[in-house]
Amino acid sequence: MNVNDKGYIHQRLLKMITDKTAVVGIIGLGYVGLPLAIHFGRHGFRVIGFDVDARKIDKILHGESYIKHIPEASIRELIDKKQLDVTIDFSHLKEADCILICVPTPLTDKMEPDLSYLLSTTKTISQHLRQGHLIVLESTTYPGTTEEMLLPSLTSSDMRIGEDFFLAFSPEREDPGNQTYTAVNIPKVVGGVTRPCLEASVALYNTITETVPVSSTRTAELTKLLENTFRSVNIAMVNELKILAHKMGIDLFEVIDAAATKPFGYTPFYPGPGLGGHCIPIDPFYLAWKAKEYDFSARFIHLAGEINVSMPYYVIEKTIEALNTHKKSLNGSRIMLLGMAYKKDIDDDRESPGYAIMKLLSEKGAIVAYNDPWISQLEPTRKYNFQMTSTAITPEVLTEMDAVIIVTDHSGYDVEEIVKFSKIVIDTRNATKNVKDNREKIFMA
Ligand SMILES: NC(=O)c1ccc[n+]([C@@H]2O[C@H](COP(=O)([O-])OP(=O)(O)OC[C@H]3O[C@@H](n4cnc5c(N)ncnc54)[C@H](O)[C@@H]3O)[C@@H](O)[C@H]2O)c1
């Protein structure tokens, strides 16, 4: 094929991807971007990681990991072999052939999509865009973002989509801390703006895992939101049923385990103290926001949000009831929260219900401490400002507390010991199910 032939740039990109001479650029080296960079590096690509956070870049360059479940050795190996380079200098985007965007997509205080990170990234890419670039958005967002927001800022009179550069959406399905499913065995859904865009992005992801091509970027965008709305709605349903089951004196966890023996038509979801993480509490609201453009109210999303947001209040109610049995008021009680990460065995505390519980307890005059083996210190967040360090769990500390609340059931917790030395244990996760002794101290919430 000749340089001037239509399709030459596309064919050249496909060849570079197939023989792994294409350079992969990853923008945003957080919970999604850093593991992705490692996977592409391990699969033989040269990877350049970009981030605006100079401290993170510095750590990676020194072979350090700032995400506990990502081993330092995996970073160091790639840095030493010069397979992975990281920088805050975005002019190196020109060296990358495939650019994957993994920046945050949070909500504003008014629960509306905050696309500021994505907008600034797109602007930066447009300043360095060149022929042969494949750009893939991995950040979760509402249907239409890729083509309504990214495409217009990248297209120009001399850069035509599908001929000069290629654009696609492929949602990230990373599940931090999950040892069974990682980037190598989680299929990647991919939607391209044009057929050549789809082909190039499918070729890229095929080098690391199985791909699921879909007909458009919108389809791929909505696929991710369906997955997370499905989780949010089902978690809300079991959270609501938990409250009913408590009133009926039935153990919902036992019910769920029994129902899970049905070999078809049922997927178990478990109740908890509320929703956490950067996905499930946020993503459905991207869809609900976009739905308004179609005069449509996404009722399941709103109802699930309402129930899940109310769960920390339920935990407080149960804590007050438990203290009441000891003739104690919440005001002035010493309460310890166990687990500030939003789920077990990871160090991610974003949107963790632990914070909502901590705030409600403090507002009611409780003296609050926390322990989390994964989070040694609480940093200020957009919503909360608890500057606190993790208190070690010792028999003395537990004895001093009026109540202990298990917010997250980290595997490292010795639940027998916790129950043995605590006066009251509020269990939001069924972590105490195998504890034989002192069961009268346990209150489910
Ligand atoms: N964490 C998850 O489990 C998960 C799973 C699936 C999808 N997602 C989605 O992936 C996206 C990224 O999430 P995350 O958890 O990795 O977020 P994160 O906050 O852990 O990481 C984002 C990184 O982007 C960097 N960044 C911010 N603005 C930037 C910019 N303009 N240029 C370059 N870097 C910038 C930040 O410094 C940070 O290091 C979000 O859309 C999220 O919804 C997350």
Image (spheres, grey):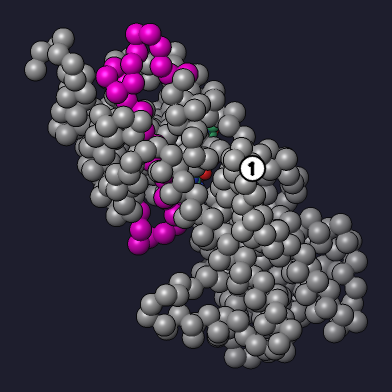
Residue 421 seen anywhere in this rendered image of the structure:
no
Left or right: 40 with respect to 178?
left
Give the image location of residue 337, x and y in percent. Answer: 70, 65
Q: How many tags in the picture?
A: 1
Check the image and report above or below for 411 versus 18.
below
Residue shown at the point (45%, 36%) measured from the top left:
102
Which residue is identified by label 1? 295
Is residue 84 covered in magenta? no
Give the image location of residue 212, x and y in percent. Answer: 29, 48
Residue shown at the point (22%, 37%) measured from the top left:
203
Give the image location of residue 58, x and y in percent. Answer: 47, 30
Label 1 Cα neighbours within 10 Å, binned few <14 / some 14-19 / many ≥20? few
Quadrant including the C terminus = bottom right
Q: Quadrant of residue 383?
A: top right
Check the image and report above or below for 203 versus 406.
above
Residue 197 seen anywhere in this rendered image of the structure:
yes
Check the image and report above or below for 335 versus 92.
below
Check the image and report above or below for 132 versus 346.
above
Q: Quadrant of residue 382?
A: top right
Residue that lies at the very extreme toward the left in this rendered image: 1
1 or 21, nearer to the observer:
1
377 or 349, nearer to the observer:
349
Secondary structure mostly seen in the magenta stretch: loop
Residue shown at the point (31%, 29%) measured from the top left:
194
Q: Secondary structure at mark 1?
A: loop
The residue range painted magenta reads: 153-182
Quadrant including the N terminus = top left
362 or 134, nearer to the observer:
134
Amino acid beneath label 1: Asp
Residue shown at the point (38%, 8%) measured from the top left:
157
Is residue 161 covered in magenta? yes
Left or right: 437 with respect to 35?
right
